[in-house]
Image (cartoon, helix red, strand yellow):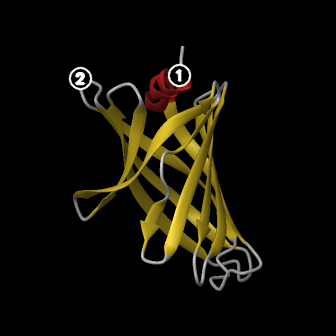
Amino acid sequence: MSALSTFWELLPRISHFRYESLPGPASMTGWKGSASGVIEVTCDPALQWIHFAESCQFELELTGQHFALKNQFRWVWQEHDSIRLEQWRRGHAVPLLDLVERSPAILVEREAHLCGADDYRLQVRLRGDGFDADWSIRGPKKDEHLAYRYRCDR
């Protein structure tokens, strides 16, 4: 089975995640911290898309402040050669990137997502109990690493 197929079958079973934000030396955001949260998964009956509604409490390491965070993503099957990741904002899908297979356990973006002057890249590593999604964001004010650990119920 391909990494894309394995990943697609895994997505509906994901129920929770851990998130860590690590700014690099060139970061001007200082957004360092972590969160744990839950995911409500909704699937299209024909299984052409899978929707994640994520919610968590993020703790900013420097101050100890807590922030409620919510995010919505949709994964869309793309004719056997990629899976598109979209972010939902104000009820509309914003395409981020298409994931393609790099190896039997790793997916990467076909092309970086550009948002203004910022370059977003993603690597997904399949695990037995879920997957790791590691984002790299580079730009004039950004040097960020976001590490998501998505897992199924035990």
Query: For mark 2, does the 10 Å Cα neighbourhood hold few (<14), some (14 to 19), or many (20 or more) residues?
Result: few
Q: CA distance from mark 1 to mark 2?
A: 17 Å
Q: Amino acid at mark 1?
A: Thr
Query: For mark 1, does the 10 Å Cα neighbourhood hold few (<14), some (14 to 19), or many (20 or more) residues?
Result: few
Q: Residue furthest top?
A: 1
- Pick the front one: 12 or 55: 12
The reply to whether residue 42 is visible in this rendering is no
- Residue 55: assigned label: none
On the image, the x and y values in percent for residue 39 come to 46, 44
Which image quadrant is residue 143 in? bottom right
Which image quadrant is residue 128 in? top right
On the image, the x and y values in percent for residue 88 come to 31, 57
Q: Helix, strand, or loop for circle 2?
A: loop
The residue that disc 1 covers is 6
> Residue at 58% across / 30% down in the picture?
153
The answer to whether residue 140 is above or below residue 122 is below
- Pick the front one: 48 or 70: 48
> Residue at 49% across / 27% down in the picture?
4
- Pick the front one: 148 or 103: 103
> Residue at 23% across / 23% down in the picture?
46
On the image, the x and y values in percent for residue 136 come to 62, 61
> Residue at 43% across / 29% down in the picture?
12
- Residue 46: assigned label: 2
Looking at the image, residue 128 sits to the left or right of residue 25; the answer is left
The reply to whether residue 116 is visible in this rendering is yes
Q: How many marks?
A: 2
Q: Amino acid at mark 2?
A: Ala
- Pick the front one: 104 or 31: 104
